[in-house]
C-alpha cells in the first residue's frame, strides 16, 4: 500500500455562506491529493500527458460527508493506493481536520487512455515500477 498526505487550508472562496467547505469543492481536494501523491513518486500529470501520451480520466467517484470542514481550517488530505493499478487506478481519499477527525472520505477510480489513439490501455510500466516497492511486502 502507498499512502501520501498533503495539507491544504480551506480558503474563503471555497466555502458556502455557513463557512463550510462547499460540497462541490471536495472533488478538487481529491484531485489535489492525487496530483501530489504522483508528484511524491517523481511523476507529474504534465509529464504523463506530454512525454508518455497518457491521460487519466475519472471513471467514477464515491464520496461521503462525515462532518464539515470550515473556512481557514487546515485539512490533511490522505490519499492511499491499496493495490497496484492494472486497467484502473483507485485512489482512496480521507480528509481530516486540525483535530485529526475524519471530515470526508471516498474514492476516485480512473482509467488510463492513450492520448493519441484515445483507447483505454493498461497501467503504464513506469508507474508500476514506481509503485511496486510499496506493494512487495503485501505479497508475503
Image (cartoon, rainbow, N blue to C red):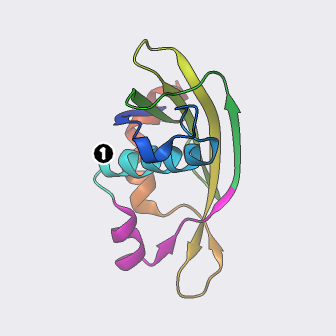
Label 1 SS: helix
Q: Which residue is mark 1?
A: 40
Question: Could you tell me which residue is drawn at 36 percent across and 35 percent down?
Answer: 9
Residue extending furthest bottom?
Answer: 116
Query: Which residue is more in the foreground, 119 or 107?
Result: 107
Residue at (34, 61) in percent of width and height: 44
Residue drawn 51% across the image and 50% down it = 28
Picture coordinates of residue 8, whole percent (x, y): 36, 37
Q: Residue at x 36, y 69 (%)?
A: 46
Quarter assignment of residue 139: top right
101 to the left or right of 38: right
Give the percent coordinates (x, y) of residue 71: 44, 32
Pinpoint residue 21: horizontal percent, then vertical percent.
53, 36
Location of residue 106 (image quadrant): top right
Q: Circle 1: is it few (<14), some (14-19), or many (20+) Cα within 10 Å?
A: few
Up/down of 69 relative to 90, above or below: above
Residue with the most extreme front position: 17
Q: Is residue 77 above or below residue 114?
A: above
Foreground of the two, 88 or 122: 88
Residue numbers of the magenta segment? 44-59
Amino acid at each position: 500500500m502507498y499512502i501520501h498526505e498533503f495539507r491544504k487550508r480551506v480558503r474563503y472562496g471555497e466555502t458556502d455562506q455557513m463557512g463550510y467547505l462547499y460540497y462541490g469543492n471536495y472533488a478538487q481536494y481529491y484531485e489535489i491529493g492525487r496530483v501530489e501523491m504522483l508528484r511524491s513518486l517523481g511523476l507529474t500529470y504534465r509529464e504523463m500527458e506530454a512525454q508518455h501520451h497518457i491521460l487519466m480520466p475519472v471513471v467514477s467517484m464515491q464520496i461521503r460527508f462525515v462532518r464539515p470542514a470550515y473556512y481557514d481550517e487546515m485539512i490533511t488530505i490522505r490519499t492511499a493506493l491499496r493495490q497496484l493499478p492494472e486497467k484502473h487506478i483507485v485512489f482512496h481519499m480521507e480528509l481530516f481536520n486540525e483535530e485529526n477527525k475524519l471530515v470526508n472520505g471516498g474514492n476516485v477510480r480512473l482509467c488510463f487512455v492513450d492520448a493519441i489513439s484515445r483507447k483505454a490501455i493498461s497501467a503504464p510500466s513506469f508507474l508500476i515500477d514506481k509503485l511496486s516497492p510499496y506493494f512487495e511486502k503485501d505479497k508475503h
